[in-house]
Image: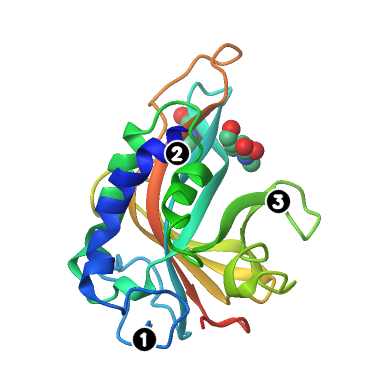
Amino acid sequence: MLAFLLAPSLLSALITCTAAAAVCKPNKDTCKLDGLSIEGLPSTLPVPTLPLSYVAAAIGVQNYTCSAAGNYSSIGAVAELYDISCLGGSKLFTTIQDRLMGLWEDAPNGLTAQKLVSSYTQTKANTVLGDHYFVPNPSGKGGLSPKWDFTSTGSTKRNKNAFVIVEKVGGATAPTGKQDVDWLATKSVSGGLAGLVYRTDTRQGQPPASCVPGQSPNIQVKYASKYWFFGGSVHHK
Ligand SMILES: *[C@@H]1O[C@H](CO)[C@@H](O)[C@H](O)[C@H]1NC(C)=O
Ligand SMILES: *[C@@H]1O[C@H](CO)[C@@H](O)[C@H](O)[C@H]1NC(C)=O
């Protein structure tokens, strides 16, 4: 019900895409990744050396726990990704993370990113690319590793290789300020979805500055961003 009520606002946020022309249908030949590249990459992050395979917008949460030092430390994230390759060259491509963050911030408590995204995708098939979440480090060293999983939807559905688990290569304070989670460069340690994954254009997602050890519960902080996938053996159709 809530998802249904939200659908019009989400649709209006993305309507430019429909109005722009038939080019706004993911998984069609008219959607091109050519000419798309990360704008404003901080000089402390390595320039990606592989061809672009996917570009996504995401909304989700960053999870934190209160450390003994009295500040929050990251314990993972969950997000829903969808294809924005068809917005390439449009103004909406540049601002999509702001539009999404606005909708996500205004969404009622209990409405998941998945429901918010599906309220839009009900009317436009094949837009969702997949999910981002954390899994045990595949090396067995302990801890959690970021994973992007495109195996359950769209043209990569049931492709067992359409995932990537990564390790961090570099991070940089968001050019938009410290209220936004860092931009990241990561590289694949498992899976065929990509050789490199970058997080850019972040909005929000940072924890409060301090917490009370032993008292403050774990928290989830909403965020939006873009994710860029380079290389890999699973390609955008
Ligand atoms: C938390 O505080 C400790 C001690 O001051 C510091 O070393 C650490 O970097 C802080 N962690 C975060 C996530 O800010
Ligand atoms: C992060 O929080 C979400 C929402 O509560 C939860 O579904 C997910 O399992 C958490 N993930 C991690 C790695 O803590």
Location of residue 20 (image quadrant): bottom left
What residue sits 36% from the left and 86% below the top?
30
- Percent x, y of residue 39: 26, 70
The residue wearing badge 3 is 135
Report helix, strand or loop for mark 1.
loop
Please name the amino acid that badge 1 sits on.
Thr
In the rendering, which numbered label is found on residue 30?
A: 1
Q: In this view, which residue lies farthest toward the left?
A: 91
Q: For the residues marked 3 and 2, what is the alpha-carbon distance in whole angstroms?
A: 28 Å
Where 123 sits versus 40, above or below? above
Where 98 sits versus 126, above or below? above
What residue sits 67% from the left and 66% below the top?
151
Please name the amino acid that badge 2 sits on.
Ala
What residue sits 66% from the left and 69% below the top?
157
What residue sits 57% from the left and 18% below the top?
217
Of marks 3 and 2, the one in the foreground: 2
Q: Nearer the viewer, residue 30 or 50?
A: 30
Q: Nearer the viewer, residue 88 or 225?
A: 88
Q: In this view, which residue lies farthest toward the top?
A: 215
Q: Residues within 10 Å of mark 2 (few under 14, many from 20)?
A: some
Q: For the residues marked 1 and 3, what is the alpha-carbon distance in whole angstroms?
A: 35 Å
